[in-house]
Image (tube, rainbow, N blue to C red):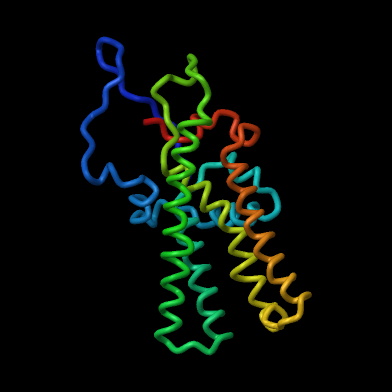
């Protein structure tokens, strides 16, 4: 999720230099930290998920850890089980649905969204170079993925959880039920866009590059 800032190492002549990166260092830190369960704070992650619904601005003022990914994955698996029960899916279909929800809807869409946000933030949103924001700073991809994850949770509650309880209504063919179903998607994507806005907004993140890992 959002990572603590670091600074580029300086050579003796004052210019910045980078040590060669190993293969493991090229993997985003958020994914490397998934293997360190003892360092995850699940209580903090649960608190952040709660505040994403009632006061999302507060979440971006705190440092996340990968525990939120574990909780989100568990939530997606739970939703897959619930939808499989509603549709009376076989075991194979239930496993396929769980795979699609986790790896396509959440992770694959997240990777694509984070990459686009990362490119946009580095090209359009970084502050001009100053004494506090060096010219070689950049938004880390892991922060963009953090923005996606935080924005995805309200969408998950709307489309994967709340909509489940209105399946008998949504499946009807009259215009009122069609309007209700479309409204769910409108609200969900509006929540996602708002979450992305908060993650890239200077009001919630006074210095975007200060919240991101500096290359």
At 48% across and 14% down in the image, what residue appears?
A: 131
At 64% across and 48% down in the image, what residue appears?
A: 194
At 35% across and 46% down in the image, what residue appears?
A: 28
Residue at the extreme right: 176
Name above or below for residue 8 compared with residue 33. above
Query: In the depicted view, which residue is nearer to us: 88 or 6?
Result: 88
* Residue 1 screen position, x and y as percent: 47, 47
Disc tally is: 0
Q: Is residue 98 left or right of 79 when viewed as pictured?
A: left
* Residue 211 screen position, x and y as percent: 50, 34
* Residue 108 screen position, x and y as percent: 42, 59
Query: In the depicted view, which residue is nearer to us: 113 or 69?
Result: 113
Name above or below for residue 99 compared with residue 4. below
* Residue 48 screen position, x and y as percent: 59, 52
Query: In the depicted view, which residue is nearer to us: 145 or 40?
Result: 145
Q: Which quarter of the image is occupied by the C terminus?
A: top left
Name above or below for residue 71 compared with residue 148. below
Residue at the extreme top: 13
């Amino acid at each position: 999720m959002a990572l603590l800032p670091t600074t580029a190492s300086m050579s003796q002549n004052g210019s910045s230099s980078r040590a060669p990166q190993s293969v493991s260092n090229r993997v985003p830190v958020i994914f490397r930290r998934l293997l360190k369960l003892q360092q995850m704070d699940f209580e903090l992650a649960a608190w952040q998920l709660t505040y994403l619904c009632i006061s999302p601005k507060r979440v971006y003022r705190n440092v996340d850890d990968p525990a939120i990914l574990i909780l989100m994955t568990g939530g997606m698996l739970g939703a897959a089980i619930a939808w499989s029960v509603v549709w009376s899916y076989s075991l194979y279909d239930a496993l396929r649905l769980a795979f699609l929800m986790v790896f396509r809807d959440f992770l694959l869409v997240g990777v694509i969204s984070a990459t686009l946000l990362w490119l946009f933030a580095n090209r359009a949103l970084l502050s001009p170079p100053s004494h506090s924001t060096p010219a070689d700073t950049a938004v880390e991809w892991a922060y963009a993925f953090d923005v996606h994850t935080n924005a995805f949770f309200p969408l998950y509650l709307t489309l994967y959880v709340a909509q489940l309880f209105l399946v008998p209504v949504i499946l009807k063919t009259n215009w009122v039920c069609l309007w209700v179903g479309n409204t769910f998607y409108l609200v969900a994507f509006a929540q996602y866009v708002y979450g992305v806005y908060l993650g890239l907004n200077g009001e919630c993140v006074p210095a975007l590059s200060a919240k991101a890992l500096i290359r």
